[in-house]
Image (cartoon, grey):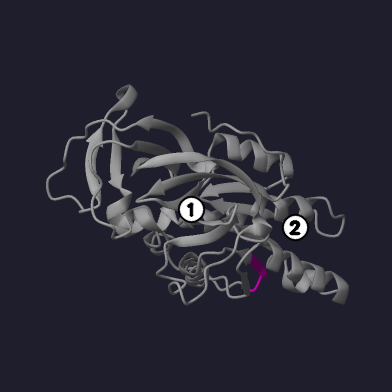
C-alpha cells in the first residue's frame, strides 16, 4: 500500500491509517509508516518481552516484530495478517495487525483527546479518538507502546547528568507537548539543566493562545523567548504552530525547536520550509538542552 500521501505544510491536517484487531478499529499517523507488507515468519528471540514476536530481515535489514494484540491485552496474534513497518525515534519496528482498512485525512481539531474515564493521562496508550462514518477509530500511542517494552527507547534523561554542573537560567521557554508523561519528563529535564522559567501546554492551540495573550498584553519577551514543540498534537499540531509563529512579524524571531519522534528526512524538509530553527528526535533530550543553549544564552 502506498502511504506516501503528501500534505501541504502547516495545514493542521494528518493522514491516519485505519487498521483492525479483532474487528476493532485503530489508527496510526501515516507519517510514521515506512511500508505495509504481508505477514512473514519471524525468528523468536529468547528471553524477550512477551509482546515481541521475534525478528525478521526484509531487504537485508533486521526488524523487530511486535504483537500489537498482546500489547493491548487481547491475547496473541496468529500467523497471517499484515505487518505495518514503522519508523520513529530512529527505530524501525513492525507491528502485527489483522487487516488494513484505508487512509483518512483529518484535521487535528477533529481528534478527541481521551478523558480520565478511559485511562490516566500518563498510563494510557491512546493519543486520540476519531469519529468516522459512525464508528470510532482509536489512535494508538506507538511511542509509549515501544517504551513500555523497552524504556531505553524513550527520553534519554540520563543525558542531562552528562552535561555536568550548570548555572540557573530564567529565559522564558514555552513548551507544547500533548503526552502528559513526556511533558513532565521534558519539564523536569530542562529544570535539571538549569532552565526554571517554563510554561508547558498540551497542544499547539494552547501554546498559540499563550503567545496571543502575551502579544495583547505587551509581555511577549517576558514570557516567550523560545518555543519547543512536538509535531503530533490534537487541536493544533507543531507544524501549524511553527507556521503561525514564523508568519507573524511580532513572533517570527522567536526560535522554534521541533522536538518529535517524527523527525525524519521528509519531516525535516517540512520543518525547514516552515521556518523551524532546529529539529531534533525525541530521545535526544541532551541535544535539546544544547540546542536551547545556542539560541538563548
Tell which of 2 and 268 is nearer to you. Answer: 2
Picture coordinates of residue 66 (x, y %)? 29, 46
Mark 2 → mark 1, Cα distance in angstroms: 21 Å
Answer above or below: position of 241 versus 199. above
The image quarter containing residue 113 is: bottom right
Q: Quadrant of the C terminus?
A: bottom right
What span is in magenta? 170-174
Picture coordinates of residue 84 (x, y %)? 40, 38
Secondary structure mainly formed by the magenta segment: loop
Of the numbered discs in the image, which one, if any, rests on residue 254? 2
Picture coordinates of residue 62 (x, y %)? 29, 32
Q: Is residue 6 magenta?
A: no
- Tell whether 91 sits left or right of 222: left
Answer above or below: position of 46 versus 75. above
Answer above or below: position of 166 versus 263. below
Residue on which disc 1 sits: 282
Amino acid at each position: 500500500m502506498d502511504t506516501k500521501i503528501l500534505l501541504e505544510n502547516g495545514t493542521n491536517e494528518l493522514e491516519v491509517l485505519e487498521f483492525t484487531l479483532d474487528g476493532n478499529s485503530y489508527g496510526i499517523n501515516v507519517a510514521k509508516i515506512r511500508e505495509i507488507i504481508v505477514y512473514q515468519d519471524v525468528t523468536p528471540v529468547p528471553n524477550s518481552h512477551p509482546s515481541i514476536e521475534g525478528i525478521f530481515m526484509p531487504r537485508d535489514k533486521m526488524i523487530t516484530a511486535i504483537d500489537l494484540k498482546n500489547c493491548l491485552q487481547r491475547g496473541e496474534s496468529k500467523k497471517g495478517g499484515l505487518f505495518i513497518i514503522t519508523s520513529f525515534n530512529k527505530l524501525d519496528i513492525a507491528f502485527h495487525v489483522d487487516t488494513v482498512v484505508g487512509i483518512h485525512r483529518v484535521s487535528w481539531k477533529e481528534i478527541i483527546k481521551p478523558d480520565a474515564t478511559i485511562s490516566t493521562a500518563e498510563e494510557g496508550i491512546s493519543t486520540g479518538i476519531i469519529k468516522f462514518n459512525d464508528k470510532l477509530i482509536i489512535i494508538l500511542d506507538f511511542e509509549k507502546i515501544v517504551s513500555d517494552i523497552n524504556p531505553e527507547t524513550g527520553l534519554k534523561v540520563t543525558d542531562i547528568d552528562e552535561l555536568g554542573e550548570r548555572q540557573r537560567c530564567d529565559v522564558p521557554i514555552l513548551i507544547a507537548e500533548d503526552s502528559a508523561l513526556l511533558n513532565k519528563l521534558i519539564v523536569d529535564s530542562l529544570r535539571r539543566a538549569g532552565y526554571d522559567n517554563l510554561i508547558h501546554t498540551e497542544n499547539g492551540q494552547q501554546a498559540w493562545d499563550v503567545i496571543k495573550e502575551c502579544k495583547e498584553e505587551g509581555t511577549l519577551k517576558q514570557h516567550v523567548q523560545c518555543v519547543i514543540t512536538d509535531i503530533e498534537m490534537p487541536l493544533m499540531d507543531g507544524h501549524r504552530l511553527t507556521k503561525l509563529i514564523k508568519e507573524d512579524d511580532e513572533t517570527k524571531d522567536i526560535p522554534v525547536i521541533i522536538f518529535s519522534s517524527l523527525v525524519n528526512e521528509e519531516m525535516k524538509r517540512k520543518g525547514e520550509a516552515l521556518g523551524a530553527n532546529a529539529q531534533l528526535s525525541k530521545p535526544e533530550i541532551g541535544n535539546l538542552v544544547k540546542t536551547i543553549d545556542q539560541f538563548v544564552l
